[in-house]
Image (spheres, grey):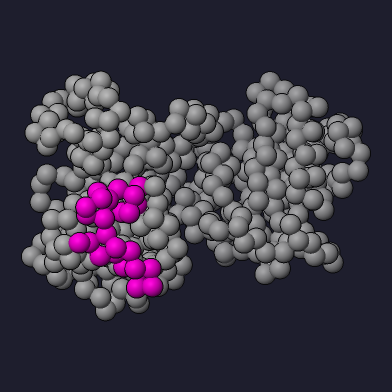
Amino acid sequence: MIRSDRAEALLGLEPEQRREELRLLSHAERAALGRHWRLWAHPGQLPPPEAWHLWLIMAGRGFGKTRAGAEWVRAIAEADPAARIALVAASLGEARRVMVEGESGLLAIASPRQRPRFEPSRRQLVWPGGARATFYSAAEPESLRGPQHSHAWGDEIAKWDQSGGRAEAAWNNLLLGLRLGCDPRVAATTTPRAVPLLRRLIAQDAIALTGGPTAANADNLPTGFLDAVQRDFAGTALGRQELLGELLEDVEGALWSRSLLERCRAEDAKDERPALLRVVVGVDPPASSHGDECGIVVAGLGADGAALVLADCSLARPSPERWARGVAEAARGWNADRVVAEANQGGAMVASVLRAAEFSLPLKLVHASRGKTARAEPVAALYEAGRVRHTALFAALEDQLCGLMAGGTYEGPGRSPDRADALVWALTELMLGRRVRPRIRSL
């Protein structure tokens, strides 16, 4: 077994030298050192050395934020028997699933002799020395009004429920309850999103802010994961957010903003999707096969009268046969009632290409009499009214939406907002077109 002085000697090395020494250890030696968090953590995962009241870790997906928060709580609980710690997540289920029982949660990282006792009925962890941690839901701000704590950890705070000011109310009640002990502190971990609570915290002077890109934790991530997310998100503005950990600023004058899209995101819509009255595939065909995208966006109308953006199946630089197959597959996969395709670039050609791919497609050709931005304005108003929800993070599509300017120009990525235009056609058909008697379907 490796003595603690060996761990201290390794800590005295420069990070690169330390990593090299750790690679040379045997499996048994590495296992013996597994609980020495400071050996394995990268700099962004360690608490700042200076005095602080709020420590915010704002970083890309896979950075190791949850592990950093859990290790901070573990160190406090093992050192201070009087510690009373609040664990706050977007819901009670997430608090238990991620912060307590997750792969990087408090139970998984505990040493055998200091493993806390989990009391699910009381939403509580109790360490052998006496420290206690209780988990709460940020969606229930009033549950944080009475309890007092010495420390707190809020996980994925940008994901907390923003409706009705719930996220900020939960944060306020949490701070007002930090009145035990002589040095109360709160740590928050999150992927950046343009939500009011996160903007408020970043604007504060008395904040210790650390973070970094997903790649900072590359040693602990599968190569396939890094390759996949780079392929899907690299080069997009949301890639800067999700991979680089940057908080994206809105473009002044754009019809859509990041904060608006976050308010309209239905986090659990894929798991609990309501019955859909109609499903439409919007298509913006490419004008050529030399660099243009084919926008293909699927949207549905819920029984509550709101629209759900279900999928972005757009294709880059496709041949006519390929984009037609893509449209047919999207329509078939989502059991669409109708395909709405812009026909300004040769209506007969668009129809014949689609019919060749799937003869039975319920097709409607539309002709654009106004510019893209003018067509988008009433759809943006639907978002403002809360009548459209996104069922997932559609990075490239949302980048284009945030580049459509009220003045009629486009300042987003690429030459043309093809994905955004396909979405506009789909939502116009669902929400702004001529009313038809829908038939109810379950997906």
Question: With 131 as the anchor, is 414 left or right in this view?
Answer: right
Residue 388 lies in what quarter of the image? bottom right
Question: With 353 as the anchor, is 384 left or right in this view?
Answer: left
**Rendered location of residue 154, percent (x, y):** 31, 58
Compare residues 306 and 153 and report the one nearer the observer.
Answer: 153
Compare residues 333 and 131 and report the one nearer the observer.
Answer: 131
**Rendered location of residue 144, percent (x, y):** 31, 73
Residue 7 lies in what quarter of the image? top left
Compare residues 292 and 1 and report the one nearer the observer.
Answer: 1
**Rendered location of residue 207, percent (x, y):** 19, 52
Residue 317 in view (yes/no)? yes
Callout count: 0
Q: Residue at x 58, y 42 (%)?
A: 397
Q: Magenta stretch?
A: 104-128
Question: With 317 as the anchor, is 114 left or right in this view?
Answer: left
Q: Check the image and report above or below for 166 versus 216.
A: below
